[in-house]
Image (cartoon, rainbow, N blue to C red):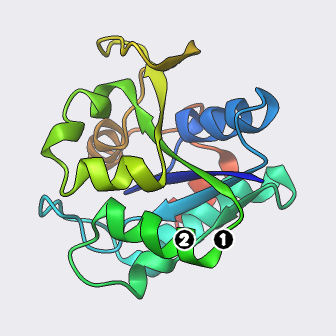
């Protein structure tokens, strides 16, 4: 089985995330996508509470009928949340499976700054998803995902803007409660 490990802050998750999951599953890149919200961001990024982001992610993956699952593994690992630790823990849990770490072409440009990036890629080689507006990566999948970022959506939400069309309705109802 090929398991795509899709880590991120998911604060909030949006249609770009959902499109990526669909692309991974229906494009033949993965049999399962594990959405892995970051528990403690290694670059000190302030995040919404972990249980809230977990609930957003549960709503995000619901349409995939079990082919995409939310994994709270980083809650149990050492802090800060380093991707290589997550991948190694999941490799121990799924020793027979092939793991791939999902990364956007924007993040791929800075992957050498991640802790133990080479170690991560030995356990779960990168599968780079192209993002509109980001420099291309030589190893990326061919489809370009839309230019949408959670940080921009948080700012728009803080300004009282309606995020309909940017965030799945199931996530949006949780955001507005």
Q: Residue at x 70, y 29 (%)?
A: 23
Element on which disc 1 rests: loop
Viewer can see residue 176: no
Give the quadrant of residue 109: top left
Q: Residues within 10 Å of mark 1 (few under 14, many from 20)?
A: few
Whole-percent x, y for residue 88 in the image: 44, 69
| Furthest-right residue in this view | 65
Please name the residue that numbered disc 2 is placed on.
90
- Disc 1 vs disc 2: Cβ atoms closer than 8 Å? yes
Q: Residue at x 66, y 41 (%)?
A: 21
Whole-percent x, y for residue 130 in the image: 46, 19
| Viewer-closest of 130 and 177 | 130
Whole-percent x, y for residue 141 in the image: 56, 19
**Residue 34, placed above or below residue 74:** above
Viewer can see residue 8: yes
| Viewer-closest of 36 and 3 | 3
Q: Residue at x 47, y 75 (%)?
A: 89
| Viewer-closest of 33 and 19 | 33
**Residue 85, placed above or below residue 124:** below
Please name the residue that numbered disc 1 is placed on.
94
**Residue 65, placed above or below residue 108:** below
Whole-percent x, y for residue 60 in the image: 65, 54
Q: Residue at x 78, y 31 (%)?
A: 28
Left or right: residue 112 compared with residue 14: left
């Amino acid at each position: 089985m090929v398991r795509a490990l899709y880590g991120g802050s998911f604060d909030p998750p949006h249609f770009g995330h959902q499109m990526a999951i669909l692309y991974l599953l229906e494009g033949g890149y993965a049999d399962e996508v594990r959405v892995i919200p970051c528990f403690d961001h290694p670059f000190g990024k302030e995040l919404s509470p972990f249980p809230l982001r977990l609930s957003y992610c549960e709503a995000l993956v619901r349409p995939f009928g079990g082919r995409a699952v939310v994994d709270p593994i980083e809650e149990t690992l050492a802090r800060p949340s380093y991707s290589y630790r997550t991948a190694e823990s999941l490799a121990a849990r799924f020793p027979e499976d092939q793991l791939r770490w999902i990364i956007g072409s924007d993040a791929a440009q800075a992957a050498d700054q991640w802790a133990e990036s080479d170690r991560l890629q030995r356990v779960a080689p990168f599968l780079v998803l192209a993002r509109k507006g980001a420099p291309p990566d030589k190893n990326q999948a061919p489809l370009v995902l839309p230019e949408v970022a959670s940080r921009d959506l948080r700012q728009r939400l803080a300004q009282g803007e309606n995020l309909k069309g940017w965030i799945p309705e199931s996530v949006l109802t949780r955001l507005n409660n």
